[in-house]
Image (spheres, rainbow, N blue to C red):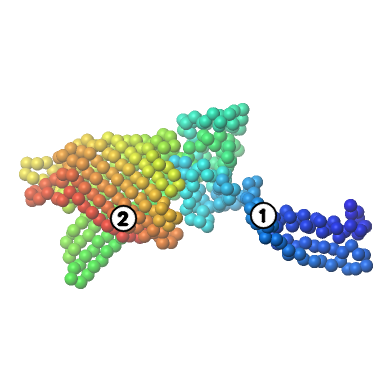
Amino acid sequence: MWRPGSRTHLGTTLWYGLAWMAGVGGGLFVPVLTVSADESQVPTAVISTTETASEQKKATSNDVPDLAWVPPQDNFDWIQLKSGEWLKGRIRAMQDDELEFDSEELDVLTFDWKDIRQLRSAQRIDLLLNFINEPSEEKKKAEKGRSWFLVGRLPEKGEELSGIVTITPEEVRVVDGVVHTIVPRSRLQSLTPGGGKEMDYWSGNASIGLTLRSGNLEQVEYNAMFYLQRRTPATRLSLDYIGNVSSIDEVESANNHRVNLAFDLWVSGQLYLILPSLEYFKDPFQNIKRRVTAGAGLGYDIIDSTKLDWAISAGPAQQWVEFESAQPDEPTESTSGALIVASRIDWDITRRLELNLEYRGQLTKKEVGETTHHFTSTLSVELTKAIDLDISFVWDRIENPKVGDDGVQPEPDDYRLVFGFGMDF
């Protein structure tokens, strides 16, 4: 062994030590320093770059992420995938066992919650605990004997927590001032950004299309669609609008508007209560001056995956209709009970291509039009990070349109193909 003041084994010691470091480096380009032990010569340095193909292959196969690495304390939220990779950005929400994450480099991504190994938030997060679904026997054994709640009282079923969040494969830690609460990860139902800023709960998108034509025919047409959503861990408020207005030679040829409002309260990971659901509809060319439908119902997520979501809902409602005109001795207003059924499919075909299919049906009595159908299909192509090209097909049908005072019954079906530019916010 080399001792201070001795140079007998200096060259050997340095050569082995640095060669060992080169081995630890996985076979990458690492300089090896060799120092001569001859006292009569000036030490010389030799750089070695020799590396075999087999060593390169071995280095690549052994290159695995370091699971012990911890992200820095900065202003970003961090998530770790099962592969060990870390991503930084902003947490948007975790509901239906899916995490939406706005990556700093990769835009908005959606992950299955089971594929997330760890999560660390820089912002305040609101969480909803779920004590309805009992964990498996394996999870119960893993939780047995652990002191999950370090400070404060035991959270109740369906209770919300709020604070800076750290999630590991086994537990969820919430820090709110001096109160530190730890719960099993299996008890986490959903989470959303919080912290007192109302705008943190909102998201949405808008799409606008405009057609102008002049010459032998003067035509103006515009189409608008927008969708707003407010999410907390336990609730979801949705508002959407679709409208179409057009005129030919200054004569109105279309003027229809539809607004839907729904408030969802999560009962479990896939089941939610809809209370209330409201719809306003207007289309003079279908002889409907205004139609209002109010109801309630239950919704359920049939398919809930990273690429494909399919939700259905149904429930009773009450409907009020005012017609533009009616036959003599017939009322221009009517009230009826209704049954509402709905279905929505969201399919991320590719990273830049998304398809949304939505259907709403209302079963009512003959006097107010019998059964009505509304179907929308929208294909969104991402042009830039902020702008999409939206191609929408809209179908509206009233099984038995009301005959007006002119004795003419409107056509039951309306079709529209809409091109527009959309923006997410």
Q: Position of residue 131 (x, y in %)?
A: 49, 31
Disc 1 marks a residue whose amino acid type is Lys
**Residue drawn at x 58%, y 35% as measured from the top left:** 182
Q: Is residue 19 left or right of residue 234?
A: right
Pick the front one: 325 or 17: 17
Quarter assignment of residue 153: top right
| Position of 53 relative to 286 (above/below) | below
Q: CA distance from mark 1 to mark 2?
A: 52 Å
Name the image quarter holding the C terminus: bottom left
Does any portion of residue 354 appear in the rendered image?
Answer: yes
Q: Position of residue 335 (x, y in %)?
A: 18, 38
Q: Is residue 285 left or right of residue 180?
A: left
Q: Which tag, 1 or 2, sits closer to the chain's start?
A: 1
CB contact under 8 Å: marks 1 and 2: no
Determine whether the residue tagged by mark 1 lies in a helix, strand or loop. Answer: helix
Which residue is identified by label 2?
A: 392
Mark 1 surroundings: few (<14), some (14-19) or many (≥20) residues within 10 A: few
Determine whether the residue tagged by mark 2 lies in a helix, strand or loop. Answer: strand
Figure label count = 2
Pick the front one: 277 or 152: 277
Disc 2 marks a residue whose amino acid type is Ser
Between marks 1 and 2 in the image, the one whose residue lies nearer the viewer: 1
Which residue is identified by label 1?
A: 58
Q: Position of residue 133 (x, y in %)?
A: 47, 31
**Residue drawn at x 56%, y 34% as measured from the top left:** 184
**Residue drawn at x 86%, y 60% as measured from the top left:** 11
Does any portion of residue 176 appear in the rendered image?
Answer: no
Quarter assignment of residue 13: bottom right
Pick the front one: 27 or 73: 27
**Residue drawn at x 87%, y 64% as measured from the top left:** 36
